[in-house]
Image: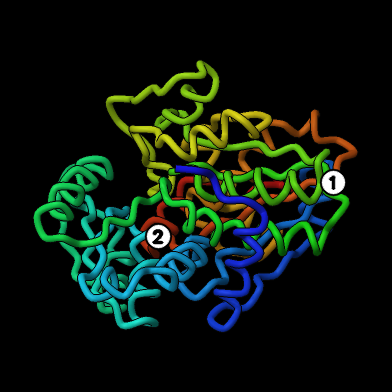
Amino acid sequence: MEPPTIEDMLRARRTIAPYLHPTPVISTSALDRLLGCATVMKCENLNPTGTFKVRGGINLVANLTPEERRRGVIVSSTGNHGQSVAYAGRLFGVRVVIGVPQRVNPYKLRAMRDLGAEVVEVGRDFDEAREWVERTAAAEGLRYIHSANEPLLIAGVGTAALELIEAVPDLDVVIVPVGGGSGACGYCIAGKTLSPRLRVIGVQSEGAPAFAHSWRERKMISTPEAATFAEGLQTRVPFELTMRILWDRLDEFVLVGERNLEEAIVLMLETTHQLAEGAGAAPLAAALKLRGALNGKRVALILSGGNITLEALRDTLSRTPTPAS
């Protein structure tokens, strides 16, 4: 399985253009003051499903063979990947089956069903749901769409990087959350092709560090659990294709704590008026940790998604004092 190229991402942009508008790149003086550097934010939370992943879902489903469309597709997801494929399935009239962990984010669960997907709650976490999906795909002849090991999916999400670099060509650093790694791979491939001096930094939770450990040790390392409230970061097992791309092109990995993620959600609201879920706030949490090293740089934070529940938002606000930024 070969990684996608910049040409694949340019083709993907043409494919998704009839269905998605480019997302805004914003900046605020409050965020610049907080971080001590010139900062922009790519607002992928403003996509129709509230997350960057819809780009990959549309590109992949649009490129299915007629036989694959007839048989239908199946995915495992904590919510955002499932929404993206469900959205694309509705666009192109393709049956979508989604395996999700038990006690998944109810907002994301409802959204997948509202989009017409058949959703099955199974397993204690993403990886157990993924194992069920892989068995079911083989048994029922469905096209399994992996959440990361899909060149067409990575090419689709890489279109966000094309938009970012074209809007801000003089970036020094991009900070992007890593769950399955497709988004980070998009920024590594497109960003570094268009701007070779660009540094790409990945972020994971300290409670779900499988990709970070694998990247540092240069071997695949799984963890016994993914202990983070940020569903988009809840991965115990690294994936072959995205890990290979990150080994080759990623510049740095940062781990942040759960309190760091909660504080970043609140700071995001205060400084940019944008709503972020835990994974979407991870780049700001990492930037705060790297504040001294970013001084004088031009930095992009990737707000990957905004699908946080009202209950989780209330809990976060109640536990996190209003910062004095």
Q: Seen in the image, is 149 located left or right of residue 325? A: left
Residue 321 visible = no
Q: Quadrant of the N terminus?
A: top left
Q: Of 176 and 280, which appears nearest the observer?
A: 176
Inspect the image, locate mark 2, and give the three-letter code of the amino acid beneath it: Asn
| Residue 72: image location, x then y, percent | 23, 70
Query: Toward which corner of the image does residue 65 lie, by quadrant?
Result: bottom left
- Identify the residue position indicated by label 2 in the image: 80
What's the residue at 26%, 71% (across, down)?
A: 67
Inspect the image, locate mark 1, and give the three-letter code of the amino acid beneath it: Arg
Secondary element under disc 1, as helix, strand or loop, is strand
| Residue 262: image location, x then y, percent | 51, 45
**Disc 2 + disc 1, Cβ < 8 Å:** no
Q: Of 321 and 138, which appears nearest the observer?
A: 138
Q: Is residue 287 above or below residue 225?
A: below
| Residue 69: image location, x then y, percent | 29, 74
Number of numbered markers: 2
Q: Residues within 10 Å of mark 2 (few under 14, many from 20)?
A: many
- Identify the residue position indicated by label 1 in the image: 298
What's the residue at 47%, 57% (across, down)?
A: 153
What's the residue at 40%, 37% (across, down)?
A: 239
Secondary element under disc 2, as helix, strand or loop, is helix
In this view, the residue farthest toward the top is 217
| Residue 286: image location, x then y, percent | 63, 37
Q: Of 102 and 132, which appears nearest the observer?
A: 132
What's the residue at 42%, 35% (across, down)?
A: 240
Q: Is residue 20 above or below residue 181?
A: below
In this view, the residue farthest toward the left is 139
Residue 165 visible = yes
Label at residue 53: none
Q: Seen in the image, is 198 located left or right of residue 322? A: right
Q: Earlier in the sequence, mark 2 or mark 1?
A: 2
